């Protein structure tokens, strides 16, 4: 795999250098359009509806149309917007894992430790496991601010970008408001049917049959000589992540700073845990940061 991004996870004063990899990939057969009579490739041209000319990418701007008016946005306009170029994945808060609704999950990424010592990486992974927490983080990818969930999958930290709250639709269906009577016998039979189909989930036993048949069809046509000779037509800059100089000192300083921010005295047990270096702290409710 090739890393697509490089930076550092940060929580408090702790810095965990990481490399980011796409966790999934698309294996669908790529198809394009051709002329049915001679097999010629169909190409799309960027033609202006006003002057009729084919326009080069360099001469194309973006625009917003509200139905009545169109606002043209030039490259300079877009560059004037505050863009995020930070190489940090900043932990905003730690939340109970069951509070993160799977409907908000978007894309998944693996995080690889990127330092001479993976201790900070392993510490964070074990802490998330032992507390059954998911870290909500903010980071920048391709000049856009992203919200994501940082969780554990096996021995790897995984980053799953989240949809923003206003991107999730509400299921407002009138049929769901109707009162429906379900008898105990119907519920019992339904549960029995579910039980008869119950098993442990094994994703490897499921395959994309359509793609398999499509590949078989293409191979058969190639074997028959039913093909046309064609000419094949057809990174991210990496910044260095910082090293963790003294992990325990960073943890201790983060605890002290958090205590000072709350304006109260910390727990003796919490300080003792930090001094021992066992990486475990009593559970405490965090105050949600303002966005």
Image (tube, grey):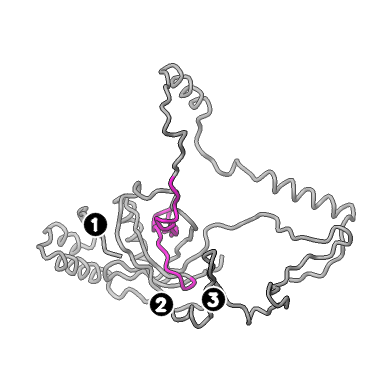
Residue at 55% x, 72% y: name it. Answer: 63
Q: Is residue 159 magenta?
A: yes
Q: Is residue 174 above or below residue 40?
A: above
Label number found at residue 72: 3
Q: Quadrant of the N terminus?
A: bottom right
In this orientation, which residue lies closer to the viewer: 145 or 177?
Answer: 177
Residue receiving disc 2:
82
The x, y position of residue 164, in whole percent, is 41, 58
Mark 3 and mark 1 lie on one chain; the one further toward the N terminus is: 3
Residue at 9% x, 62% y: name it. Answer: 265
| Residue most extreme to the front | 68
The x, y position of residue 211, in whole percent, is 70, 49
Residue at 87% x, 65% y: name it. Answer: 229
Q: Is residue 28 above or below residue 263?
A: above
Mark in front: 3 vs 2? 3
In this orientation, which residue lies closer to the viewer: 171 or 144?
Answer: 171
The x, y position of residue 46, in whole percent, is 69, 73
Q: Quadrant of the C terminus?
A: bottom left
The residue carrying pointer 1 sits among few (fewer than 14), some (14 to 19) or many (20 or more) residues within 10 Å by Cα, namely: some
In this orientation, which residue lies closer to the viewer: 141 or 180?
Answer: 180
Label number found at residue 5: none
Q: Is residue 120 magenta?
A: no
- What element does badge 2 sit on? loop
Q: CA distance from mark 3 to mark 1?
A: 54 Å
Number of residue marks: 3
Q: CA distance from mark 1 to mark 2?
A: 38 Å
Mark 1 and mark 2 lie on one chain; the one further toward the N terminus is: 2
The residue carrying pointer 3 sits among few (fewer than 14), some (14 to 19) or many (20 or more) residues within 10 Å by Cα, namely: few
Mark 3 and mark 2 lie on one chain; the one further toward the N terminus is: 3
Magenta segment range? 142-170
Residue receiving disc 1:
280
Mark in front: 3 vs 1? 3
């Amino acid at each position: 795999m090739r890393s697509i991004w490089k930076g550092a996870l940060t929580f408090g004063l702790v810095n965990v250098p990481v490399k980011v990899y796409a966790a999934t990939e698309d294996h669908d057969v790529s198809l394009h359009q051709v002329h049915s009579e001679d097999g010629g490739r169909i190409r799309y041209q960027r033609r202006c509806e006003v002057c009729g000319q084919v326009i080069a990418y360099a001469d194309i701007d973006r625009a917003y149309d509200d139905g009545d008016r169109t606002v043209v946005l030039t490259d300079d306009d877009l560059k004037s917007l505050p863009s995020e170029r930070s190489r940090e994945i900043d932990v905003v808060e730690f939340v109970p894992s069951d509070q993160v609704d799977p409907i908000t999950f978007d894309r998944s990424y693996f995080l690889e430790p990127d330092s001479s010592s993976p201790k900070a990486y392993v510490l964070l992974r074990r802490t998330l496991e032992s507390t059954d927490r998911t870290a909500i983080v903010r980071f920048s990818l391709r000049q856009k601010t992203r919200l994501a969930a940082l969780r554990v999958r096996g021995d790897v930290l995984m980053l799953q970008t989240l949809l923003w709250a206003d991107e999730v639709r509400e299921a407002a269906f009138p049929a769901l408001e109707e009162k429906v009577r379900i008898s105990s016998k119907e519920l019992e039979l339904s549960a029995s049917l579910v039980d008869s189909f119950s098993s442990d989930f094994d994703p490897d036993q499921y395959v994309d049959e359509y793609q398999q048949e499509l590949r078989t069809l293409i191979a058969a046509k190639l074997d028959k000589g039913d093909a046309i000779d064609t000419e094949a037509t057809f990174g991210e800059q990496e910044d260095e992540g910082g090293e963790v100089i003294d992990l325990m000192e960073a943890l201790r300083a983060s605890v002290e700073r958090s205590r000072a921010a709350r304006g109260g005295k910390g727990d003796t047990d919490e300080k003792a845990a930090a001094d021992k270096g066992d990486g475990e702290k009593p559970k405490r409710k965090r105050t949600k940061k303002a966005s």
